[in-house]
Image: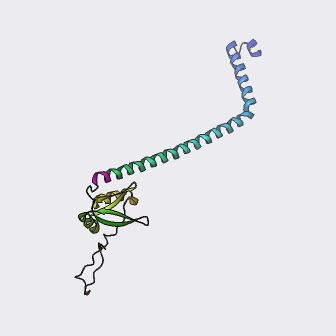
């Protein structure tokens, strides 16, 4: 008011100075509560970071589940399109799956192919299917649990001095 009377300050500048002074006083009185606001902001940021991490984990799980479903669908498609159709016969072929002996009734030609390793048994759900070896390799790349191991691919070493080398022992003896 004194500056206004002397003419150094006009009415607008005086009003602005009063307003600035009011703001400063208001901010000084809130400085104690500013710490509380900072704590609230920190808690909010922490909660946001936790939510982002949780969402990232959920998305990762969904992605892995989608990949598993896609692989399972690929395996089913490979089995369905490449399985041997007319396999039924009178010859029993025994194999083991998870320490249980299972059996398939196959024809003589299919039995021969199984013994030489040209056909492989794969597990499709609760059923067993026969597929060619190249298809079984593709399935094995995706999931090794689907392939039933028959161990016919293993070749025995031959001794040159074996007197019975000319007499092969058949592994498909039927009793």
Residue at 75% in and 12% down = 5
In the rendering, at what x and y percent does residue 139 appear? 34, 57
Left or right of 1 in this view: 89: left
Residue at 70% in and 20% down = 19
The image quadrant of residue 32 is top right
Nearer to me, 43 or 7: 43
Whether 50 is drawn above or below 8: the answer is below
Q: Which quarter shows the N terminus?
A: top right
The image quadrant of residue 26 is top right
Nearer to me, 154 or 123: 123
> How many marks can you see?
0
Q: Which quarter shows the C terminus?
A: bottom left
Nearer to me, 68 or 131: 131
| Residue furthest out toward the left | 166
Q: Which residues are magenta?
A: 78-86
Residue at 40% in and 60% down = 145
Whether 82 is drawn above or below 52: the answer is below
In the rendering, at what x and y percent does residue 170 appear? 27, 75
Left or right of 107 in this view: 58: right
In the rendering, at what x and y percent does residue 72 appear? 39, 51
Q: How is the image coloured?
A: rainbow
Q: Is residue 2 magenta?
A: no
In the rendering, at what x and y percent does residue 146 appear? 38, 58
| Residue furthest out toward the right | 2
Residue at 70% in and 34% down = 34
Nearer to me, 19 or 39: 39
The image quadrant of residue 9 is top right
């Amino acid at each position: 008011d004194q500056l206004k009377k002397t003419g150094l300050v006009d009415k607008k500048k005086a009003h602005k100075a009063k307003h600035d002074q009011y703001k400063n006083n208001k901010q000084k009185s809130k400085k104690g509560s500013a710490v509380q606001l900072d704590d609230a902001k920190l808690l909010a940021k922490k909660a946001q970071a936790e939510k982002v991490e949780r969402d990232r984990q959920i998305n990762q799980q969904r992605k892995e589940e989608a990949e598993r479903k896609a692989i399972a669908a690929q395996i089913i498609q490979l089995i369905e399109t490449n399985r041997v159709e007319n396999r039924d016969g009178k010859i029993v072929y025994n194999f083991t799956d998870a320490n249980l002996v299972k059996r398939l009734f196959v024809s003589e030609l299919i039995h021969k192919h199984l013994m030489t390793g040209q056909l492989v048994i794969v597990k499709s759900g609760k059923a067993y299917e026969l597929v060619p070896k190249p298809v079984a390799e593709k399935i094995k790349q995706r999931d090794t649990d689907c392939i039933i191991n028959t161990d016919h691919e293993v070749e025995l070493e031959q001794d040159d001095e074996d007197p019975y080398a000319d007499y092969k022992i058949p592994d498909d003896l039927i009793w």
